[in-house]
């Protein structure tokens, strides 16, 4: 299972890249706004921090302008993945771009039928938003189960990129279901390492080690 960081904060991305746990990055217009940085400049910097796909989202709503924006974005770096919304124009753009060998992430997916369309349009990734489903009173993980079943039924290559991840249980459930990727805020990735018994165990070992009076490094 691949881990993507869902952020445009380059300090966080750098820190995660150094752990060796980072397989890519996703951004969206809200995350770019939050970074306060120039879109092209920050995207180029992120592309240099990871060898994995970096999703950069188009903001046009019509196919023709999406294609023009994608043309600009894909020149940033070889690992740019064009992010398009799950609309008919977005799917048309997805088909055109993936036919030319450009990676595409179809975002804002909220139903299994939408995910079926993304796969038929040749998407590299589809991004179902689990947290926003939960916020709306429906279980976001049911959507991931349905998409996994459908993609396996037809042997679609499109990778399921679980998005809008809010906590560790979303990650665990995604892994159980067999989702290909989870994109997470950096704090969620780091929190996966936490366990109270790990902390307690370290505390005990350190106390006993101190009693020996030994050092490993001389
Ligand atoms: C995915 O690519 C999106 O950027 C993201 O996961 C949305 O998450 P949110 O619902 O927390 O805004």
Image: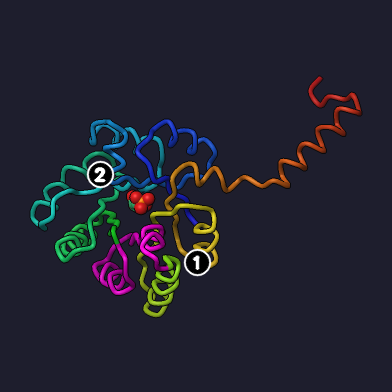
Q: Position of residue 181 (x, y in %)?
A: 44, 57
> Circle 2: is it few (<14), some (14-19), or many (20+) Cα within 10 Å?
some
* Upstream in sequence: badge 2 or badge 1: 2
Relative horizontal placement of residue 116, taking residue 202 as reference (left or right): left
Secondary structure of residue under mark 1: loop
151 or 197: which is nearer to us? 197
Q: Residue 142 magenta-drawn?
A: no
Secondary structure of residue under mark 2: helix
Q: Residue at x 41, y 62 (%)?
A: 134
Which span of residues is magenta-colored?
A: 109-138
Q: Which mark is residue 155?
A: none
The quadrant holding residue 42 is: top left
Q: Residue at x 39, y 33 (%)?
A: 10
Q: Residue at x 54, y 42 (%)?
A: 190
Q: Position of residue 174 (x, y in %)?
A: 49, 62
Q: Residue 128 magenta-drawn?
A: yes
Residue lying furthest top in this view? 218
Relative horizontal placement of residue 33, taking residue 134 as reference (left or right): left
- Marks 2 and 1 in Cβ contact (< 8 Å): no
Q: Position of residue 95 (x, y in %)?
A: 20, 64
Residue occupied by mark 2: 29
Residue occupied by mark 1: 178
Q: Position of residue 71 (x, y in %)?
A: 16, 47
185 or 2: which is nearer to us? 185
């Amino acid at each position: 299972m691949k881990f993507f960081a869902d952020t445009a904060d380059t300090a966080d991305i750098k820190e995660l890249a150094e752990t060796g746990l980072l397989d890519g990055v996703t951004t969206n217009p809200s995350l770019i706004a939050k970074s306060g940085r120039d879109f092209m400049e920050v995207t180029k910097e992120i592309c240099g921090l990871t060898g994995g796909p970096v999703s950069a989202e188009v903001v046009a709503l019509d196919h023709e302008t999406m294609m023009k924006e994608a043309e600009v974005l894909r020149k940033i770096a070889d690992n740019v993945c064009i992010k398009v919304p799950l609309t008919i124009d977005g799917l048309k753009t997805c088909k055109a771009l993936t036919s030319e060998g450009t990676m595409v992430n179809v975002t804002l997916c909220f139903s299994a039928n939408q995910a079926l369309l993304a796969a038929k349009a040749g998407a590299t990734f589809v991004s179902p938003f689990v947290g926003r489903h939960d916020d709306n009173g429906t279980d976001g993980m049911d959507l991931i189960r349905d998409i996994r079943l459908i993609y396996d039924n037809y042997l679609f290559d499109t990778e399921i990129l679980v998005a809008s991840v809010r906590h560790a249980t979303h990650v665990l459930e995604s892994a159980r279901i067999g989702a290909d990727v989870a994109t997470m805020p950096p704090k969620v990735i780091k929190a996966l390492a936490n366990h109270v018994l790990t902390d307690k165990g370290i505390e005990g070992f350190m106390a006993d080690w101190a009693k020996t009076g030994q050092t490993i490094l001389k």
